[in-house]
Every structure is written in structure tokens, then in C-alpha cells.
Image (tube, helix red, strand yellow):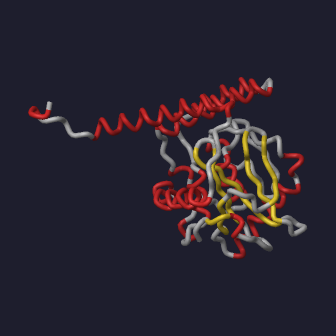
């Protein structure tokens, strides 16, 4: 199913919806489900120790129902409902971090959250992926992800934003956390649109999906999101970090273009 305005995607019973919108570094993702009382809720990792639970649908989000058989929905739904029930206990526990492998497995089948000793946390996308992993239905094969210089620049920008946030909020733990994030920045990143694409993959048999197989569908999802969601301004606190990141991406793009450009013939010089 395509991603359309979340206001046009209703959920009931054990149906799980994937919701996506604009974020500081591109896009942002969450999951939606009806709680035990039948009220639709959206759960997403907004930022460092900032797990957010709010009503669904939210304006300016796109959504689609995850392509899972009924038996699969019955596995994922208890994980999310468990997190909704435990929300007050876990909302401040999920750190924002970039170590994909160490973070995997923190979400348990009952909805509890227990990060491993080497984990620096999750991103919004790795958090959603870990929910499905905790249910025994992994969406993506992390071993197939390749490091890139673009993702390394993103990791640097995340560390920059965390630093600014820690300073603004006077968070004593933040310098040590930022140090861990920088040490774990190996250029690996799971994009929200990659997780969103894997969740609605028509052929469930290909999951956990490999990164190379999600390229086209992830680009399509990003385009669908941009058609129905409007990007907001960059938070002033993070503006310099984001601008530095954008400059780094532009520099990398120009470097690639220079490498593939044909050499000038003698008469063209």
C-alpha cells in the first residue's frame, strides 16, 4: 500500500500502521496501534530520552498499514501495547544513538526496554525496526547495510545536535554519551523510509529485507511522504549542526562528480 495522509488511514483491532513525516535530517518514523481500550496511539522516538506517545492520527504525517498476515499482527501488537502500558517507565529510557548492532534486541516481546551494555541507543528508525525484531518478525537484515561517508557525516551531525541539546538542558551525562556516539559512528544508518518500505513490502517472504533491495521502494516512500507532509523549519538550536551536515553532503556529492567526470581533451582546455 502507498503512504497517504495519516488522517485517511484508520486502524482497528491488531492492525499496525507505520507513520512517517519530515525530520531534522530528512524523515522521521513511528508506529501506530489501538491500545487495550481501543484508542489509536502513535509511538515514536522523537529525540534523546524522548519516547513520545500521542493520539493517532497526527496532522502532517503519512501512514500505511504494515503488510503482515493476521498472525503477524498478533505478534507485533502485544509488543507495542506493552510499550504503551509501560510508557511512564520507559519514556525516558531510550537514548538517541547510532550503534545499530549493539542497539538491536533492546525491545522485548512484552514491550519492556532493556539496552545492552554496549548500546548507545536508537534512532527513530532503528527503534521501529527493533519493535518488529522483538516480536520475532524482523523487517530488515542489518548485516546487509553498508557504511557510507554520507552516513558518517550524519553521525557527526547527530553528535553535534546531542552536544547542543545537552548544553541547553544542562544534562550531566551528555558529554560521555556524545563521546560514545562519536566512537560508534562507523557510517552506518538505517533510513526511516527504508524501514517504512520494508514494513509494507508486498512480498513478506523477502523479509528481513536487504538494503540493496529497498533502494527503489524507499525512494518511493520518501516521495509519497513529501507529497502529503510539509517540512517545518530546522530548530534554531540545531541549525548550525544541520547546515554543517548539508555542506558535508554537498562536498561529498561534488567529490563523486569530479571522480566520474571524463577528462578534458587537449583542445577543450
Report the quarter where the C terminus lies. Answer: top left
Residue 258: quadrant of the picture: top left
Q: Quadrant of the N terminus?
A: bottom right
Residue 160 position within the rendered picture, expressed as x and y whole percent measured from the top left: 63, 28
x and y, in percent, of residue 115 in the image: 75, 42
Residue 221 shown left or right of residue 74 in the figure = left
The residue sitting at 54% across, 72% down in the picture is 203
Which residue is nearer to you in this view: 132 or 193?
Answer: 193
> Can residue 89 be seen from the camera position used here?
yes
41 left or right of 249 in image? right
From the viewer's perspective, tell me whether residue 248 is left or right of residue 162: left
Q: Position of residue 47 (x, y in %)?
A: 72, 41
Q: Which residue is drawn at 49% across and 57% down?
A: 219
- Nearest the eye: 227 or 222: 227
Name the outermost residue toward the bottom. Answer: 70
What residue is drawn where x is 60% and y is 28%? 240
| Residue at 73% from the left image edge and 36% from the top image edge | 117
* Nearer to the camera, 211 or 115: 211
- In the image, farthest residue toward the left: 267
**Residue 208 visible in the current orientation:** no
Amino acid at each position: 500500500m502507498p503512504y497517504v495522509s495519516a488522517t485517511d488511514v484508520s486502524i482497528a483491532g491488531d492492525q499496525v500502521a507505520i507513520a512517517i513525516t519530515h525530520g531534522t535530517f530528512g524523515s522521521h518514523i513511528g508506529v501506530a496501534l489501538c491500545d487495550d481500550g481501543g484508542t489509536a496511539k502513535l509511538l515514536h522516538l522523537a529525540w534523546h530520552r524522548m519516547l513520545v506517545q500521542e493520539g493517532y492520527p497526527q496532522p502532517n504525517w503519512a501512514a500505511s498499514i504494515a503488510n503482515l498476515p493476521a498472525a503477524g499482527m498478533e505478534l507485533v501488537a502485544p509488543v507495542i501495547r506493552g510499550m504503551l502500558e509501560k510508557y511512564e517507565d520507559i519514556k525516558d529510557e531510550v537514548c538517541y544513538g547510532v550503534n545499530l548492532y549493539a542497539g538491536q534486541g533492546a525491545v522485548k516481546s512484552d514491550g519492556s526496554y532493556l539496552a545492552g551494555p554496549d548500546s548507545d541507543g536508537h534512532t527513530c528508525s532503528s527503534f521501529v525496526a527493533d519493535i518488529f525484531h522483538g516480536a520475532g518478525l524482523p523487517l530488515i537484515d542489518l548485516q546487509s547495510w553498508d557504511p557510507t561517508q554520507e552516513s558518517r557525516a550524519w553521525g557527526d551531525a547527530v553528535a553535534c545536535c546531542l552536544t547542543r541539546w545537552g548544553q541547553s538542558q544542562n544534562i550531566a551525562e551528555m558529554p560521555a554519551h556524545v563521546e560514545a556516539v562519536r566512537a560508534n559512528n562507523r557510517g552506518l544508518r538505517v533510513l526511516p523510509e527504508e524501514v517504512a518500505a520494508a514494513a509494507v513490502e508486498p512480498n513478506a517472504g523477502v523479509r528481513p529485507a536487504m538494503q540493496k533491495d529497498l533502494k527503489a521502494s524507499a525512494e518511493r516512500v520518501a516521495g509519497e511522504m513529501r507529497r502529503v507532509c510539509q517540512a517545518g523549519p530546522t530548530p534554531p538550536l540545531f541549525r548550525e549542526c544541520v547546515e554543517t551536515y548539508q555542506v558535508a553532503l554537498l562536498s561529498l556529492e561534488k567529490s563523486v562528480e569530479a571522480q566520474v567526470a571524463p577528462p578534458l581533451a587537449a583542445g577543450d582546455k
